[in-house]
Amino acid sequence: MKRSEVMLQKGMTLKEVQDHILKVDHHPELKLEVMLKLVEEVGELAVEVRKESINGPSDTLLTNMKHELYDVLHFVAHIANIYNINLEDAVIEKDAINAIRYKEKRR
């Protein structure tokens, strides 16, 4: 399916975003390459955060950070899809573990 045929919409759930990425970018045969792309994107995000810490915030830097954050999310979802992991379930499960581990107060 072409990317232009399926577009993300404001207000989508994490599951809907994950399903979108499955439709437009699913390559289970490229597990290592997808993981390396995630690391690359985290590095690109780190560069933008470092620039902001040195130069202060700017609209351009914040836009770049926003784009890099999406790229990171994209490859996290891609990896989850390769291993058939529902990210919404993973978030809920791990948040509950962290709440106990760090004794966070729940709202």
Image (cartoon, rainbow, N blue to C red):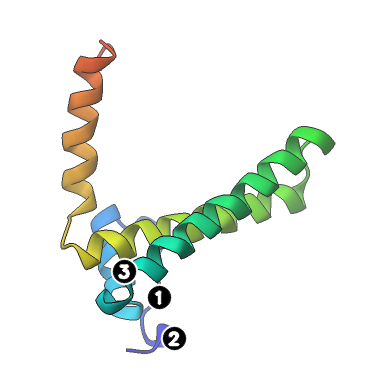
Residue 1 picture quarter = bottom left
Q: Is residue 70 left or right of residue 15?
A: right
Q: Residue at x 21, y 48 (%)?
A: 88
Q: Which residue is mark 2?
A: 4
Q: Marks 1 and 2: in contact by CB < 8 Å?
A: yes
Q: Earlier in the sequence, mark 2 or mark 3?
A: 2
Q: Marks 3 and 2: in contact by CB < 8 Å?
A: no
2 or 3: mark nearer the eye: 3
Q: Which residue is mark 3?
A: 31
Q: Where does residue 52 sit, x and y in percent of width and height? A: 74, 39
Q: Is residue 64 left or right of residue 107?
A: right
- Other residues around mark 2 within 10 Å, as few (<14) / some (14–19) / many (≥20): few
The span from disc 1 to disc 3 (Cα, nearest Å) is 24 Å
SS state under label 3: helix
1 or 3: mark nearer the eye: 3
Q: Residue at x 24, y 40 (%)?
A: 91
Q: Residue at x 25, y 59 (%)?
A: 80
The span from disc 2 to disc 1 (Cα, nearest Å) is 7 Å
Q: Where does residue 100 sit, x and y in percent of width and height? A: 19, 16
> Relative to residue 7, is residue 37 depicted above or below?
above
**Residue type of the residue flagged with mark 1:** Met
Q: Where does residue 50 sit, x and y in percent of width and height? A: 71, 40
> Relative to residue 1, is residue 39 depicted above or below?
above
Q: Which residue is mark 1?
A: 7
SS state under label 1: loop
**Residue type of the residue flagged with mark 2:** Ser
**Residue type of the residue flagged with mark 3:** Lys
- Other residues around mark 3 within 10 Å, as few (<14) / some (14–19) / many (≥20): some
Q: Earlier in the sequence, mark 1 or mark 3?
A: 1
Q: Is residue 34 left or right of residue 91?
A: right
